[in-house]
Image: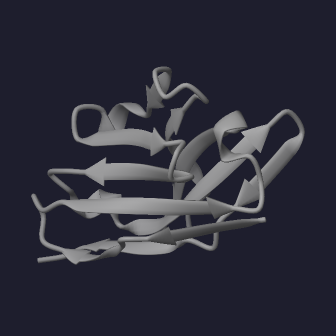
C-alpha cells in the first residue's frame, strides 16, 4: 500500500498550493480519504475529508472557504486546493485512507507559509 503526497512548498501569505495524494496497491475508490496536518509541537489535526463518492465533504472551521478537497477515483488521487494561505497553515500535511478498521497514511508533504 502506498500513499504519496506531493505539492508542498513555501509560499507567501495569500498564496496558493495544490496538494496531491497518489494511491496505489489498494482499491482507492472504496476508501474515505482525508487530509491532516501537524505543526511543530502540536497534535495532528483533521483538515478536510471526502467520502468515496466525492460529494460528502468536511472541513475544519479554520479552512472553510479557503481549502477544497477533491478526489479522482479514475486516477487514484486525492487533492487539496489551498488558497489564501495563512501563517497558521504551516505544517506537515498528510493524506489518510480509511475503510472500516483499515487505515493508511502517507509520509507527508511540508507546507510553509512565510513572508
Q: Quadrant of the C terminus?
A: bottom left
Q: Quadrant of residue 26?
A: bottom right
Residue 62 percent coordinates (x, y)? 33, 38
Residue at the spot x=80%, y=49% of the render?
103
**Residue situated in front as seen by the camera: 24 or 15:** 24
Residue 70 percent coordinates (x, y)? 41, 40
Residue 36 percent coordinates (x, y)? 54, 52
Most extreme residue toward the right, as rendered?
Answer: 101
Most extreme residue toward the top, as rendered?
Answer: 56
Give the left or right position of residue 78, taking residue 26 as reference. Answer: left
Residue 41 vs 99, above or below: the answer is: below
Q: Quadrant of residue 32?
A: top right
Q: Quadrant of the N terminus?
A: bottom right
Residue at the spot x=46%, y=21% of the render?
55
Give the left or right position of residue 1, taking residue 32 as reference. Answer: right
Residue at the spot x=54%, y=42% of the render?
73
**Residue situated in front as seen by the camera: 98 or 23:** 23
Residue 104 vs 40, above or below: the answer is: above
Residue 33 percent coordinates (x, y)? 60, 42
Q: Quadrant of residue 100?
A: top right
Amino acid at each position: 500500500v502506498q500513499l504519496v503526497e506531493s505539492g508542498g512548498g513555501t509560499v507567501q501569505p495569500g498564496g496558493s498550493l495544490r496538494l496531491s495524494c497518489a494511491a496505489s496497491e489498494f482499491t482507492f475508490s472504496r476508501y474515505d480519504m482525508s487530509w491532516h496536518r501537524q505543526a511543530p509541537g502540536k497534535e495532528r489535526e483533521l483538515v478536510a475529508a471526502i467520502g468515496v463518492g466525492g460529494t460528502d465533504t468536511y472541513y475544519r472551521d479554520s479552512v472553510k472557504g479557503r481549502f477544497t478537497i477533491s478526489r479522482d477515483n479514475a486516477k487514484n488521487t486525492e487533492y487539496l486546493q489551498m488558497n489564501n494561505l495563512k501563517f497558521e497553515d504551516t505544517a506537515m500535511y498528510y493524506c489518510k485512507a480509511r475503510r472500516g478498521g483499515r487505515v493508511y497514511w502517507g509520509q507527508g508533504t511540508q507546507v510553509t507559509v512565510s513572508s
